Image (cartoon, rainbow, N blue to C red):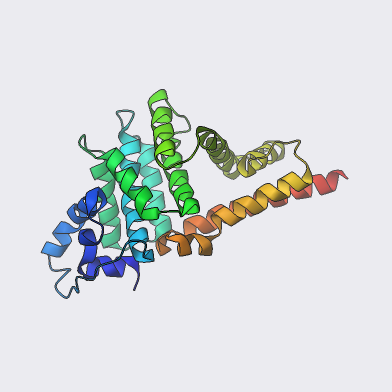
Amino acid sequence: MSWWGKVVGGAFGFMLGGPLGALLGAALGNYFDAGLDSTGTGDFLGRGSTERVQTAFFTATFSIMGYIAKSDGHVSRTEIELAERVMQQMRLSPRQRQVAIDLFNAGKEDDFPFLQVLAQFRQEAARRRTLLQMFLEIIVATAFADGALDAEERKLLHDITAQLGFAPEQLDRLLSRISGQTQFAQTKSSEEQLRAAHKLLGVAEGASGADVKRAYRRQMNQHHPDKLVAKGLPDEMMDIATRKAQEIKAAYELIKASRDSAT
């Protein structure tokens, strides 16, 4: 049974406890009151189980997306559109979509327990570092949705990075890669797209072929959909991971083709 099946089967907040369980329980409360749990089993998901980690990922992702969007005092249309795009890519059912919206809105509340949510998510994810990085990429993309970061958003991203156990320079590299990813998808000029491809892979334009290949393999290893799902990425986010992997491959092939044609 998938993580969502376990949730609607009656475990919802009880299987997590803590702030994540409280957030999910509140988001689901109305649906259970309406009879969604009428045949529930009350299954308990043990710490470290794939379904439990997937539930924690879903809950933390959408609630902190809301928190990030509100951090500069105003939730922009582009930030809302990004959240909607993530929901669309996940192909959420109507009930899942409403829960995601409720979690996003909970993150915008003044009393949202930001640090506690992050701490519990890191604990639930345990040593799944690639999963934590995927989470961070989605959160950074939310902050970067309008194409720029103000001082408050940048400080907040550094706080999140530190809370998840990553070094500050890892955030800087991630910001550069996400900027490159956006430019790679939108740029029409071949010269600009090639420059964006290097940024997406996280390599300098003058990097050796061996360095480019290593960066490509490292990025593919970190974004391989099957590996991420096995680590606890919700199945619904498979398409997001697949698109990232496809963009990484396309960037590498563009760089390789450009260099091959120059020799």
252 with respect to 223 (left or right) = right
In this figure, what is the number of numbered marks?
A: 0
- Which residue reaches farthest top? 151
Measuring from the top left, give residue 124's x and y in whole percent: 35, 54
Point 26% across, 65% down: residue: 7
Residue in the foreground of this view, choosing between 87 and 152: 152
Classify 97 as above or below 69: below
192 with respect to 129 (left or right) = right
220 with respect to 69 (left or right) = right
Which quadrant of the view contains residue 67? top left
Residue in the foreground of this view, choosing between 97 and 49: 49
Residue in the foreground of this view, choosing between 195 and 231: 231
Point 26% across, 51% down: residue: 20
Measuring from the top left, give residue 128's x and y in whole percent: 46, 55
229 with respect to 120 (left or right) = right
Which quadrant of the rendered structure holds the N terminus? bottom left
- Which residue reaches farthest left? 33
Which quadrant of the view contains residue 14? bottom left
Classify 175 as above or below 137: above
Q: Can residue 92 be seen in this view?
A: no
Which quadrant of the rendered structure holds the C terminus? top right
- Which residue reaches farthest right? 263
Q: Is residue 204 visible?
A: yes
Point 28% across, 42% down: residue: 116
Measuring from the top left, give residue 53's x and y in whole percent: 36, 59
Point 55% across, 37% down: residue: 179
Measuring from the top left, give residue 68's x and y in whole percent: 35, 37
Classify 244 as above or below 175: below
